[in-house]
C-alpha cells in the first residue's frame, strides 16, 4: 500500500504541474504580430527583400508564408517556414506577392492573420542605369567658388543625392538631396575636390551607381610675364624671320593675352592677341603700317592667364616703336 501511495502522489503532482504550466502559457487567439515591411502596396525592385514584423507577446514561433500573386487565388507558394526571430531575407524576382505571419507557442496559435500585398517590378530597378554627368567637366580647374553641378535627368528617378568632398584629409563639404538634375553649391574654398551623384527612389529603395569626377578651385594669380623683346624705347623692324615680341612666363601659365595701345593710358586699343607660346610676330597690316618711312608708337601689355582663368597683375605699359 505504501508503494501505491507513492505512485498516486507522483501522478497527482505531475498533473498539477502540467496544469500550472498550462495556466502560464499566453493565449494568442486574440493577438497578432504587427507587420512592418514590406508595407502594403509597396512597389520595389528585384532584390533581397527583408520581411520584418514586431514580436507578439507570448509567441515563441512565427510561421512566415509568401504566395504569388495573393492568398485568394494563390498560384505558387514562395515560402513557408517556421522562425523564432522577427526578420527574414529572401530574394524575389519580378511579380506580385502577398505575405503573412502566424504567431504560435506551445499551446496556442493566433486566430486572425494580417496580410500585406507588394509588387516587385523591374521597371523601378535603378541599379543598371548610368548617370551622364554634364558639369563640371572632369578635371576642371576654375577660379569660381560657386559652381553649377548638372547631369542628364532620368525619368524613373524621384531624387538625386549629391556629395562633395575635399581637403586633406578628405572631408565632406556638401551632402544633400537634390530634386532635379541641377544644383548650385556656393562658397567653396580653394583646393582639390571630388564630387559624386546618384539617383534614388526612396519608395522602392533602389539606387543608381554613383557617378562622379574631380575638379580644382584655384584662386592664385600667376606671376607676371617678363618682357625680353622689345625693351622700353626700342624700335623693331617687322619681319617674319625673328620674333618681334618675346617674354618669359610662369610655369602655370596656360596662355598669354597681349594688348597694343596707341596711348599711354591704355584707352585706344590697336590690337589684342592671344598666344600659347612666349613669342609672337607682328604683321604690318595689324598695326596699320604700309609706308616704309612711317614709324608707329605703341604701348604694350602682356598678361599671363592660368587654367583656372586667373590673370597676372598688370605692369606699366611698355613703349616701343615699329616700322617696316
Image: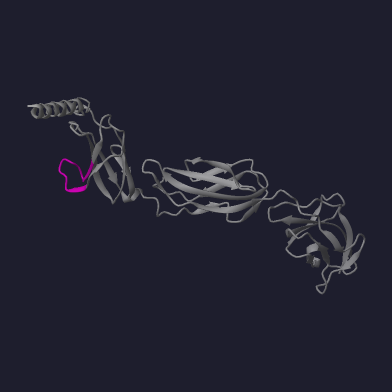
Residue at left 43%, top 50%?
208
Please state which of residues 123 and 296 is positioned toward the viewer in this rendering: 123
Q: Is residue 229 above or below residue 16?
A: below
Q: Colour mode?
A: one colour
Numbered-mark total = 0
Position in image of residue 90 (x %, y %): 30, 48
Q: Residue furthest left?
A: 1
Position in image of residue 238 (x %, y %): 84, 69
Q: Residue furthest bottom?
A: 241
Q: Quadrant of the N terminus?
A: top left
Position in image of residue 22 (x %, y %): 18, 27
Residue at left 82%, top 65%?
246
Q: Is residue 138 above or below residue 57?
A: below
Residue at left 72%, top 56%?
306
Q: Quadrant of residue 273?
A: bottom right
Task: Examine the rendering and report whether any part of residue 153 can be seen.
Answer: yes
Q: Does the stretch in magenta take in 36?
A: no
Please state which of residues 22 and 236 is positioned toward the viewer in this rendering: 22
Classify residue 94 as left or right of residue 229: left
Q: Does the stretch in magenta take in 65?
A: yes
Please state which of residues 296 and 25 is positioned toward the viewer in this rendering: 25
Extent of the magenta region: 64-78
Q: Quadrant of residue 282?
A: bottom right
Q: Residue furthest right?
A: 233
Task: Examine the rendering and report whether any part of residue 44 can be seen.
Answer: no
Classify residue 210 as left or right of residue 293: left
Position in image of residue 31 (x %, y %): 23, 28
Q: Quadrant of the C terminus?
A: bottom right
Amino acid at each position: 500500500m505504501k508503494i501505491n501511495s507513492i505512485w498516486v502522489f507522483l501522478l497527482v503532482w505531475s498533473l498539477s504541474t502540467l496544469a500550472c504550466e498550462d495556466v502560464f502559457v499566453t493565449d494568442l487567439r486574440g493577438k497578432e504580430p504587427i507587420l512592418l515591411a514590406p508595407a502594403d502596396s509597396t512597389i520595389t525592385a528585384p532584390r533581397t527583400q527583408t520581411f520584418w514584423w514586431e514580436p507578439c507577446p507570448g509567441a515563441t514561433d512565427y510561421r512566415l508564408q509568401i504566395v504569388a500573386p495573393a492568398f485568394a487565388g494563390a498560384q505558387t507558394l514562395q515560402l513557408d517556414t517556421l522562425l523564432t526571430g522577427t526578420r527574414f531575407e529572401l530574394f524575389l524576382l519580378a511579380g506580385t506577392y502577398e505575405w503573412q505571419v502566424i504567431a504560435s507557442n506551445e499551446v496556442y496559435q493566433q486566430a486572425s492573420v494580417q496580410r500585406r500585398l507588394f509588387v516587385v517590378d523591374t521597371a523601378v530597378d535603378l541599379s543598371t542605369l548610368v548617370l551622364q554627368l554634364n558639369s563640371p567637366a572632369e578635371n576642371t580647374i576654375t577660379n569660381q567658388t560657386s559652381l553649377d553641378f548638372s547631369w542628364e535627368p532620368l525619368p524613373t528617378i524621384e531624387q538625386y543625392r549629391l556629395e562633395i568632398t575635399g581637403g586633406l584629409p578628405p572631408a565632406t563639404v556638401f551632402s544633400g538631396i537634390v530634386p532635379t538634375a541641377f544644383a548650385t553649391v556656393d562658397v567653396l574654398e580653394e583646393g582639390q575636390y571630388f564630387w559624386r551623384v546618384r539617383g534614388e527612389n526612396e519608395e522602392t529603395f533602389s539606387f543608381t551607381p554613383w557617378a562622379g569626377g574631380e575638379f580644382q578651385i584655384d584662386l592664385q594669380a600667376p606671376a607676371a610675364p617678363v618682357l625680353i623683346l622689345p625693351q622700353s624705347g626700342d624700335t623693331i623692324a617687322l619681319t617674319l624671320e625673328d620674333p618681334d615680341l618675346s617674354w618669359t612666363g610662369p610655369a602655370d601659365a596656360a596662355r598669354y593675352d597681349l594688348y597694343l595701345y596707341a596711348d599711354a593710358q591704355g584707352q585706344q586699343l590697336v590690337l589684342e592677341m592671344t598666344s600659347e607660346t612666349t613669342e609672337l610676330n607682328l604683321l604690318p597690316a595689324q598695326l596699320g603700317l604700309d609706308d616704309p618711312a612711317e614709324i608707329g608708337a605703341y604701348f604694350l601689355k602682356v598678361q599671363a592667364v592660368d587654367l583656372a582663368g586667373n590673370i597676372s597683375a598688370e605692369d606699366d605699359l611698355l613703349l616701343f616703336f615699329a616700322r617696316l
